[in-house]
Image (spheres, rainbow, N blue to C red):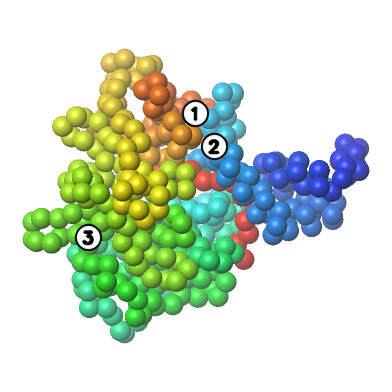
Amino acid sequence: MRSAKKIECLPDQLIQEILSTSPVKSLIQSSCVSNAWRNLITDTSFINLHLNRSIQRNKFSLLLSNSDNIYSIHDPMSTTTTATTKWPFPYGHESHNYYDVVGSCNGLLLIIPNRGCLGIWNPSTGDFICIPSPCRSLKNYTVFLPLCDKMYGFGYGSNRSDYKIVSIDCGAAVEIRVFSMQSRSWKTIEGSNIDNVGFNTTLYTDSDGIFVNGAVHWLGSFFYTKIDKVKRVIAFDLGCEEFRKIPLPDHLKNSNEYSRLSIWGESICLFIKDCKERSSHIFVMKEYGVRDSWCKLCTIPEAPIPKAPKRNIPHAEYWSIVCFVDDHKILLQQKGLYNLFLYDTRSDKFVELELHKDIKNFFDEAYCFVCAYIPSLVPIK
């Protein structure tokens, strides 16, 4: 208490500077120091300042979920013992077996259980709301989206405080719905430019929507004959609530290899496996919306794990990008075995992530989900 009083004697601007780089858990505890601190920490300007600095410093955590537990790994790149937090299941453990995170933005996670409604959760603060299911309208679009069930995206438009969920409900007809956090309601998007983007595209249902530059992006294949197809990136702008196409160069568009979208900094990137070379390539669109700005970032080879020379990393299709740690380090999840590896593009080396003893056997489960998020104070209003 004495040290807290000493800190309170510091200038307000200096206190704000110190607190804006503090972990969320410490800030929640600090809000009990005084009314002045509570008012500061819950102020929208401070919340945005703290969020922006966390993004700039790439202070991410990992969320791990299986059928029994949910953990967060804080500062996973730390060389010391990594701290973990075990979270209660947002919906209650009894009614659900596992969860998928189908969207992430500013520390808020859009989650869907194996049964039940969508939810928005801030694991850092514990805030959670259950999103009511949208009602199917009587009027449907007549365009057809084959081999696709339902796609989701999560982010915000021109108003950063109004987070939105976009749902693409596919079947014999396609319906686009948007849920606004401010209005707490769904609306069906009618009269959009859905036909103009060529929506006879098969979206990859195992690839979540990627939020970049105010829009949610999905990867799919456009069939211009019954056999021939090209890759296509479809974006839904959460501000104007319209679709647009993101251009791909021919060598990416015409590739038949396994591909997935991801985020590199504030840009979208494309992860493509190469069966012939038994490796995978990452391409980044350096300037948003500019076709010629796509360039190769790196090639990830198939390589032995240093700690287990006889054990080879699986073929590239078993990799998924968890996040980019910096401009030359990538955190990868090993699909099937679910292990986490840090790949250094400069040294061309893999290092298996050392996990805390509390989650030593976490990856033994048949189902395990891993995602990265930025811990934040962003409220769910």
Instruction: Classify 10 Å Cα crowding around label 1: few (below 14), some (14-19), many (20 and above).
Output: some
Q: Which residue is mark 2?
A: 73
Q: Which residue is mark 3?
A: 202
Describe residue 256's horizontal placement relative to residue 345 as left or right. left
Describe residue 83's horizontal placement relative to residue 153 as left or right. right
Towards the viewer: 213 or 311: 213
Cβ–Cβ below 8 Å for labels 3 and 2?
no
Label 1: state its secondary structure: loop
Cβ–Cβ below 8 Å for labels 2 and 1?
yes
Instruction: Classify 10 Å Cα crowding around label 3: few (below 14), some (14-19), many (20 and above).
Output: some
Residue 33: horizontal and vertical position, in percent?
83, 48
The numbered dot on residue 276 is: none
Describe residue 289's horizontal placement relative to residue 73 as left or right. left
Label 3: state its secondary structure: strand
Q: Which residue is mark 1?
A: 355
C-alpha gap between disc 3 and disc 1: 37 Å
